[in-house]
Amino acid sequence: MPAMKLLILPGDGIGPEVMAEVRKVIDWFGANRGLDFSVEEDLVGGAAYDAHGAPLSDETMAKAQSVDAVLLGAVGGPAYDNLDFSLKPERGLLRLRKEMDLYANLRPAQCFDALADYSSLKKDIVAGLDIMIVRELTSGMYFGEPRGIHTEGNERVGINTHRYTTSEIRRVGRSAFELAMKRGKRVCSMEKANVMEAGILWREEIEVIAKDYPEIELSHMYADNGAMQLVRNPKQFDVIVTDNLFGDILSDCAAMLTGSLGMLPSASLGAPMENGRPKALYEPVHGSAPDIAGQGKANPCACLLSFAMALRYSFDLGAEADMLEAAVNEVLDQGVRTADLAQSEGATPVSTAEMGDAVLAAMDSNDW
Ligand code: IPM
Ligand code: MG
């Protein structure tokens, strides 16, 4: 098998620290399981702006297009708050999503048993939670034209456009149905068909896709009700499919159900490349956390679990992904906690690197 090509973009804030732990895991799989990864590293976000004056250089974009999977840490920080819109760190991430055409963003929200007490919701509402949000990532309000700010008489006017086409809705719909087939066989589609034409189209096109999946139980929900239901009774959901902007909001809401933003991975997938692997970018859901950057306090688990998603979705290495996920679970069961989690238990926190080492030790000690 040819080497599996990875491009690592640690980015800003805690990105480099958590990514360093992923590199250890990549090396572990090389040494212990004979997995042949070739790894390149480059800049994105504020780090790229500092070096090149742009949040993603054309060279880095080209590299991202040529590898099997991109692993991204986080982008952004207060130093870049006043930059022109087009130069902000986030634009680097949005360019990757758009130019790689990563239309299906998978955001699992899983409640780890050892962490069920961390949620702001009652334990019995979240214990055992396992839902998957599939967010459309390359269209809708984030990218629709016309957009901009202009002046009309005495008024300034800000415009963004919420626009979806048949094919854009159908392809992300298919991703959601395919995932549901491997899970609980239920899909809930969320939009605002009561007020938005694009919502009506969304609902109709999802219905069309559903005909190809007779085993799937499909339901529809207005997105505002969806937000309420996520907090009221999240375990009613299996797979949720929704547009870019609603998905941004609903996935943050779902993330917090688990009580631990530092634990949540994501995958952004596009069409298959020539070698059959999908275009793909993996990143933790947490941001760059500038307040704790560089202090060794960050929780690397979300980034490690994002790499597990890469093993599963890019390289079809489901057993290895299970192995890494089980090791993270085991370490949590042992009571090992980074600072984000230690506080509420009064436990002594371990550092980012110690958490990574504990996961490696769990992988070492298990007889896989
Ligand atoms: C996310 C983030 C991004 C988004 C930002 C950083 C541009 O909030 O991945 O959810 O809005 O999509
Ligand atoms: Mg977001």
Image (spheres, rainbow, N blue to C red):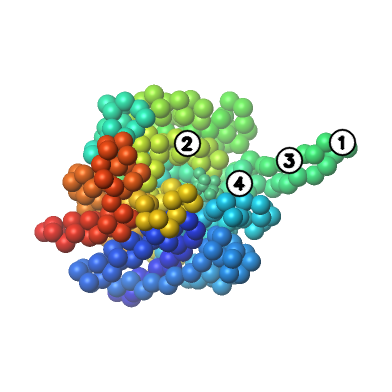
Which residue of the protein is positioned furthest toward the right in this rendering? 153
Q: CA distance from mark 2 to mark 3?
A: 24 Å
Which residue of the protein is positioned furthest toward the bottom in this rendering? 2
Q: CA distance from mark 4 to mark 1?
A: 27 Å
Q: CA distance from mark 1 to mark 3?
A: 13 Å
Kind of residue at badge 4: Tyr
Total marks in image: 4
On the image, numbered disc 3 is attached to which residue?
Answer: 158
Q: Residues within 10 Å of mark 2 (few under 14, many from 20)?
A: many
The answer to whether the residues at label 4 and label 1 have Cβ atoms under 8 Å apart is no
The answer to whether the residues at label 2 and label 4 have Cβ atoms under 8 Å apart is no
Mark 4 Cβ inside 8 Å of ligand 1: yes
SS at badge 4: helix
Task: Tell me the mark number nearer the camera, choosing from 4 and 3.
Answer: 3
The residue sitting at 46% across, 39% down in the picture is: 252
The residue sitting at 36% across, 52% down in the picture is: 297
In terms of image quadrants, where is residue 58? Answer: bottom right
Query: Where residue 144 sits: x, y (%)?
Result: 65, 47
Q: CA distance from mark 2 to mark 4?
A: 15 Å
Mark 2 Cβ inside 8 Å of ligand 2: no
On the image, numbered disc 4 is attached to which residue?
Answer: 142
In terms of image quadrants, where is residue 344? Answer: top left
Q: Residues within 10 Å of mark 1 (few under 14, many from 20)?
A: few
Mark 4 or mark 3, earlier in chain: 4
Mark 2 or mark 1, earlier in chain: 1
Kind of residue at badge 2: Leu
Left or right for 8, reference 35:
right
On the image, numbered disc 2 is attached to which residue?
Answer: 250
Q: Residues within 10 Å of mark 3 (few under 14, many from 20)?
A: few
Task: Tell me the mark number nearer the camera, choosing from 1 and 3.
Answer: 1
